[in-house]
Each structure stands twice: as structure tokens, then as C-alpha cells.
């Protein structure tokens, strides 16, 4: 076990777990710019003083997850304190954030997949700069969580004693399932057209907030998400993708990566000095 200081860059939308009720995959960079995955984290069940934000430095005890072949994967020791430190802002056109996360930008998806498959590397987290973003699509998917997992969560809650049940009822409800799958269509330096799904917490919350403001109109909500992630990010931002693999498909999928977050500083204006 080792205490690590990590800048949180990614939080995925929660998924249900029969063991932990609900899980979030968190990823970030250490002070030297190397990637680290923190999983599993029952984030919304953490005490408030342990709930960290994106772009916040935290310090916590981490244990190398020996059941996970991916070298970046660590388990948090949730019995020890999580120190919530300073947040990194967007000043000087995201200069400090860029300095931390743009140290090893991938530009060729074919080469990155080869790194993931290489037994000496097994790269499973990266930041990618696409050469072209061709489209942003949304497709219907399952509208409800898997019934067996829902039953497991319910059974776990019922096992709590009376005091814990009352407390849990006030602080934890199963997160709403997003009934759409959002994806980017893009190319990198290899010229291959690819479609990758986005599993970021931000996109899920944007959909839910848009759905509320659209008074339940799902088509309008999806269009609002597209306006943000395609019209705005592609036209006005220097868009990068945070990519991660899943343990289940890391070795067997032709492309094991999904988009676990977006990095979107303002585009550099012509004549402006660059950070590097």
C-alpha cells in the first residue's frame, strides 16, 4: 500500500454492482504525468468529506490491483482518509491543466491499440488527439438497469440494520439509467474511421439536465448534448479524448478503448504564443 497524490481528470457515469451497489471508475495523473486508474469507487456512497471533484488533487492510500493485468489499475483503501487538496482551474487558457495532461498525447489509434496489446506495456489509459472529428451520434439502448443487479442492490439495502436503512434512504438512491448511447466518429493519423462510445459522468448529467429543462422531451435533450459535444467542442475547442480500456475486453476486443472523458481547452488563436 502506498499513499499517492493524484489529479482527478476522469469520472465515468455510475454503473450498478452486485457487490458495491454502484461504482464509478476514476482516472487521473500523478505529479510526474503518469496515468493511474482508481477502481472500484462507490463514489456517491462516500462521506461528503471524501467526495472529490474533477480537476482536484487528492491524496489517498492505493493498493496495486493484482487481479487486473492493466498496470495503471489500483484499488483505494476506503478505510483510510482521502485528503481533498487544491483544484486546478482554467486560467491562462487551461495552461496548468495542459501542462499536466498533455505530456504524452497519442495521435495514432492503430499504434495505441498495439501498445494495449503489447504484453510489455498493456497501455490502458491515454489522451488522444484526433485529426478529424466526423460526427457525434446517439442511439437508444437499454432503458432500465439489469434486473438482477437491481435486485442485488435492493437485497443489500435490506440487510442493513434499521438505523443504516434510514440513513441510506436519505443519502443513496440508484442513479438513473441513461437510455441512450453517445459516441464520437473520428479519424487519427492512421486514417481509419472509428466510432467510440463515451462513458463520461459529464455527458450523463448533461443529458439528464437537458431532459429536465426540455420537460421530458428526449429528442430535444439528445440534441442539446450534440450541440455541446459536437457543435461547440469541435468548432470552438481544442478537443482531445481521454481513453481507457475495460478489463473484460482489454485482450480480446479488436479495439479495447472507450472514451472515458473529454479535454476541451479553447482553440489557440492565430498569433498567440503556445504553452510549449
Image (cartoon, grey):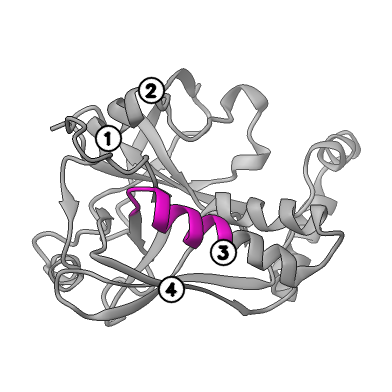
Find the residue positioned furthest to the left.
120
Q: Residue at x 71, y 63 (%)?
A: 221
Residue 259 x, y percent position in the rendering: 40, 62
Q: CA distance from mark 4 to mark 2?
A: 30 Å
- Label drawn at residue 76: none
Q: Is residue 155 magenta?
A: no
Horizontal side, residue 53 vs residue 87: left or right: right
Horizontal side, residue 169 vs residue 259: left or right: right
Per the image, the residue denoted by label 1 is: 98
Q: Residue at x 57, y 55 (%)?
A: 203
Per the image, the residue denoted by label 4 is: 135
Counting residues from the start of the chain, the first of labels 3 and 1 encountered is 1
For label 1, count other residues whose C-alpha is less than 10 Å away and answer few (under 14), some (14-19) or many (20+). Answer: some
Residue 55 x, y percent position in the rendering: 43, 31
From which residue to which does the magenta span run?
227-240
Residues at discs 3 and 4 in contact (Cβ within 8 Å): no
**Position of the N terminus by quadrant:** top left
Name the front one of labels 2 and 1.
2
Name the front one of labels 3 and 1.
3
Counting residues from the start of the chain, the first of labels 2 and 1 encountered is 2
Q: CA distance from mark 3 to mark 2?
A: 26 Å
For label 4, count other residues whose C-alpha is less than 10 Å away and answer few (under 14), some (14-19) or many (20+). Answer: some
Q: Nearer the viewer, residue 14 or 164?
A: 14
Counting residues from the start of the chain, the first of labels 4 and 2 encountered is 2
Residue 257 x, y percent position in the rendering: 33, 68
Horizontal side, residue 102 vs residue 246: left or right: left
SS state under label 1: helix
Counting residues from the start of the chain, the first of labels 3 and 2 encountered is 2
SS state under label 4: strand
Per the image, the residue denoted by label 3 is: 226
Counting residues from the start of the chain, the first of labels 3 and 4 encountered is 4
Amino acid at each position: 500500500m502506498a499513499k499517492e497524490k493524484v489529479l482527478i481528470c476522469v469520472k465515468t457515469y455510475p454503473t450498478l454492482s452486485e457487490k458495491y451497489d454502484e461504482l464509478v471508475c476514476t482516472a487521473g495523473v500523478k505529479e510526474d504525468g503518469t496515468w493511474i486508474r482508481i477502481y472500484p469507487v462507490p463514489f456517491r456512497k462516500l462521506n461528503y468529506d471524501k467526495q472529490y471533484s474533477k480537476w482536484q488533487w487528492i491524496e489517498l492510500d492505493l493498493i496495486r490491483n493484482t487481479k487486473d493485468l492493466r498496470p495503471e489499475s489500483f484499488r483505494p483503501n476506503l478505510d483510510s482518509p482521502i485528503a481533498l487538496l487544491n483544484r486546478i482551474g482554467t486560467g491562462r487558457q487551461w495552461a496548468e491543466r495542459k501542462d499536466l495532461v498533455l505530456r504524452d498525447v497519442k495521435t495514432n489509434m492503430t499504434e495505441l491499440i498495439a501498445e494495449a496489446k503489447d504484453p510489455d506495456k498493456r497501455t490502458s489509459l491515454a489522451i488522444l488527439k484526433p485529426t478529424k472529428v466526423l460526427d457525434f451520434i446517439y442511439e437508444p439502448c437499454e432503458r432500465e438497469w439489469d434486473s438482477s443487479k437491481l435486485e442485488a442492490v435492493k437485497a443489500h439495502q435490506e440487510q442493513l440494520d434499521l438505523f443504516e436503512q434510514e440513513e441510506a434512504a436519505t443519502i443513496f438512491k440508484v442513479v438513473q439509467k441513461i437510455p441512450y448511447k453517445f459516441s464520437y466518429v473520428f479519424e487519427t493519423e492512421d486514417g481509419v474511421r472509428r466510432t467510440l462510445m463515451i462513458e463520461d459522468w459529464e455527458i450523463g448529467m448533461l443529458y439528464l439536465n437537458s431532459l429536465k429543462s426540455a420537460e421530458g422531451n428526449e429528442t430535444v435533450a439528445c440534441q442539446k448534448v450534440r450541440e455541446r459535444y459536437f457543435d461547440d467542442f469541435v468548432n470552438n475547442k481544442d478537443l482531445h479524448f481521454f481513453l481507457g480500456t475495460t478489463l473484460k475486453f482489454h485482450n480480446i476486443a479488436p479495439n479495447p478503448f472507450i472514451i472515458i472523458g473529454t479535454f476541451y481547452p479553447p482553440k489557440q488563436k492565430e498569433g498567440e504564443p503556445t504553452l510549449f
